[in-house]
Image (spheres, rainbow, N blue to C red):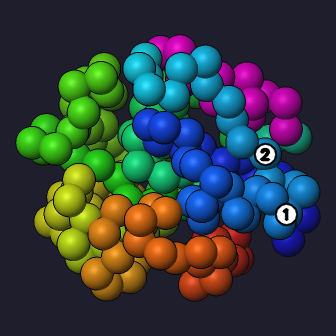
Amino acid sequence: MSTPILILPGIGGSGPDHWQTLWQQAEPRMQRVQQRDWEQPQRDEWVQALEAAVAATAGDAILVAHSLGCLLVAHWGLQTRRKISGAMLVAPPDPSGAGFPAAARSFGPLPQQRLPFPSMIVASSNDPYGNVAFSRNAARAWGSLYRSIGPCGHINATSGLGHWKAGRMLLWELSAS
């Protein structure tokens, strides 16, 4: 796989022990889309940063989003004219859920249209920010493949996944589809 991969963290920017950071360190073609403020996200600003990052690729990038990064991809995907190869959307949070951070309210409501590129939602059965019903509904609305990985919390550094080799296999599955 030689396709460029853009890493899209959620709030906090995926710290040093997060699988996104570990993947990026291990794979030179993975590049993090930087945001000005990882703690006080503004949807329009984050969408503009993603648009610029995709524009810098040859139009065949794969996006690997976690948490709020998934909502970013959904909002961006419904307004861009740029092409990508696909998006892996890991642990999308429910913007109407009780645990959704007030700082990220600009990312709601959840887009309900089919995404214009192949996508896969990867969900945990005990994610405190997006339950199974929410994840399945998002997958239906976005036209995404749905993969459950069992009880792994928010699929972040706290989940203890390390380099998350099973996640790399899911990325391979998406890129092959």
Gap in angstroms between the C-alphas marked 2 and 1: 9 Å
Instruction: Give the number of the disc on residue 27.
Output: 1
Please provide the residue range marked out in magenta: 43-57
Question: Left of 93 or right of it: where is 18?
Answer: right
Instruction: Kindly identify which residue carries mark 2.
Output: 31
For residue 71, say whether it is visible.
Answer: yes
The type of residue carrying mark 2 is Gln
Q: Quadrant of residue 107?
A: top left
The type of residue carrying mark 1 is Glu
Measuring from the top left, give residue 71's x and y in whole percent: 39, 40
Q: Secondary structure at mark 2?
A: strand
- Looking at the image, residue 62 lies above or below residue 168: above
| Mark 2 surroundings: few (<14), some (14-19) or many (≥20) residues within 10 A | some
Can you say which quadrant of the picture contains the C terminus? bottom right
Indicate yes or no whether the magenta region holds residue 49.
yes
Q: Residue at left 23%, top 53%?
A: 129
Foreground of the two, 41 or 75: 41
Q: Main secondary structure of the magenta part?
A: helix
Q: Secondary structure at mark 1?
A: loop
Can you say which quadrant of the picture contains the N terminus? bottom right
Indicate yes or no whether the magenta region holds residue 58.
no
Measuring from the top left, give residue 2's x and y in whole percent: 90, 64
Q: Residue at left 65%, top 75%?
A: 163
- Looking at the image, residue 72 lies above or below residue 37: below
Question: Left of 72 or right of it: where is 27?
Answer: right
Measuring from the top left, give residue 38's x and y in whole percent: 51, 28
Residue furthest to the left: 98
Q: Residue at left 57%, top 84%?
A: 166
| Mark 1 surroundings: few (<14), some (14-19) or many (≥20) residues within 10 A | few
Instruction: Give the number of the disc on residue 146.
Output: none
- Looking at the image, residue 53 lies above or below residue 161: above
